[in-house]
Amino acid sequence: MNHAYKKFKSMRRLRNKGLVLICFAGLSCTDKIIQLELSEGADFRKNAIVRLKLPDKLKTQPFQLIGKNPKGNFEIPYQIEADYVYWINGFEPSQYSLIMKTPSFQENIKMVEKGGQLEVYQDKTKIVGYQMAMKNPPAGVEKAYKRSGYLHPVNTPSGKRLTQIQPKDHYHHYGIWNPWTHTLFDGDTLDFWNLAKKEGTVRFAKMLKKNSGPVFSNFEVLHEHVVLKNQTEKVALNETQKIKIFLITENQYLMDITINYECATAQPFKIIKYRYAGFGWRTTEEWDNQNSRVLSSEGNTRENADGSTARWCIVDGTLSKGYGGGLMLSHPENYNHPEPLRVWPENQYGRGDLFVNFATTKTTDWTLDPGKIYTLKYQLLIYDGKMETTNAEALWDQFVHPTTYRIKP
């Protein structure tokens, strides 16, 4: 662990305890100070990702972000993307200001390309893997089950795995992934989910960008939805995924996932109503109907969540040496929101194996026309411990109405 990262972790830990981190009592009166305040109508939220829109003059000028509470002043890690600077609130309200000095913080969320994966690390713990290389099925299994362009493993901050791929019951299940099951393209009905049909697949095509910093890591990838027909391939739909990973606390991190779809030809791509498709999670084999929990925003559980609609869904359970899981959040701008859920029944394969899916087109068709971009937005809050419904509701509200600051007049 390098010196800068040790400093960051120490400062965040102290900040979250409400202690003084670095005092600036010796700040010269000649240093320019810019005061910040919450935007009109915004409230303080603890451990929330917050942002400030930067004026042009600050986009190229180094500055420190300073917080102040009753115990003193402290420097706060931040990260700039496009027109905004992002940081994470602590446990208690602070007064924020900017001073024109070089910040002390450096990159702390590491990304490494290794063995065909883009790996994301919190300290020395791998928390997320994104699969770039084609993953073949186990020996002796039909080669059509190969895939790329999915998230696995997705681990808790302590390293406990929450996903699985290529289970014997569904070799086409790949961690967290999002193909469409029943589609119409160029006069044919095609299935991009059930790979054994050999009608279509989804694959990683290109890494568009990647970046790491003191607050988040992010990467953008291109996926191709490929029609397999008469021993030829044709790309029907292009998909870009923009994924940001924020370290919230030592026990939580957030994946912000924006998916954009655009027709790859002059033909429309129609997604036909079907009981499962889209953003899905095949959970760890450790979970069954005795040691895991599903709880939706509408109060539905594993028993009755399937077919209901939800804004968010808690999925967690007992893991080796502890408890953990994830909160799935759907944005209200998504098509057919609140989105229908597909949740496997409690008696799945006898023991209650678990699969949870925001099935956007479970109750309706969705036609994607050429020349337009269609967007789905999700967040996954991954955690060690247990999620309370009040916290889940607050996190969904934060997703929909992010806390913003502005420069004080």
Image (spheres, rainbow, N blue to C red):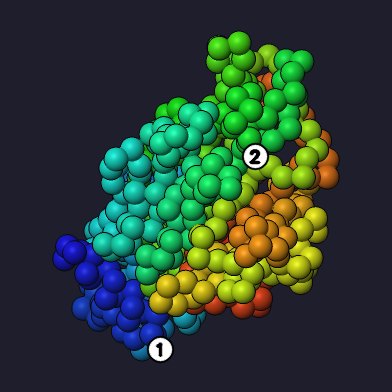
Q: Residues within 10 Å of mark 2 (few under 14, many from 20)?
A: some
Residue at left offset 59%, top offset 32%: 195
Q: Residues within 10 Å of mark 1 (few under 14, many from 20)?
A: few
Relative to 317, does residue 185 appear above or below in the rendering? Answer: above
Q: Nearer the viewer, residue 77 or 59?
A: 77
Q: Nearer the viewer, residue 142 or 358?
A: 142
**Alpha carbon of mark 1 to alpha carbon of mark 2: how far?**
43 Å
- Residue 190 seen in the figure: yes
Relative to 67, does residue 186 appear above or below in the rendering? Answer: above
Horizontally, residue 340 falls left or right of residue 263, namely right
Residue at left offset 61%, top offset 78%: 388
Task: Name which quarter of the figure residue 208 lies in.
Answer: top left
Q: How many marks?
A: 2
Task: Name which quarter of the figure residue 230 lies in.
Answer: top right
The amino acid pointed to by label 1 is Pro
Q: Nearer the viewer, residue 132 or 209?
A: 132
Q: Position of residue 7 (x, y in %)?
A: 22, 70
Label annotation for residue 375: 2
The amino acid pointed to by label 2 is Thr
Residue at left offset 44%, top offset 77%: 322
Residue located beneath label 1 in the image = 70
Label annotation for residue 242: none
Horizontally, residue 362 falls left or right of residue 217, namely right
Secondary structure, mark 2, is strand
Q: Are marks 1 and 2 in contact (CB under 8 Å)?
A: no
Considering every residue shown, the one lying at the far left of the view is 3
Relative to 220, does residue 303 appear above or below in the rendering? Answer: below
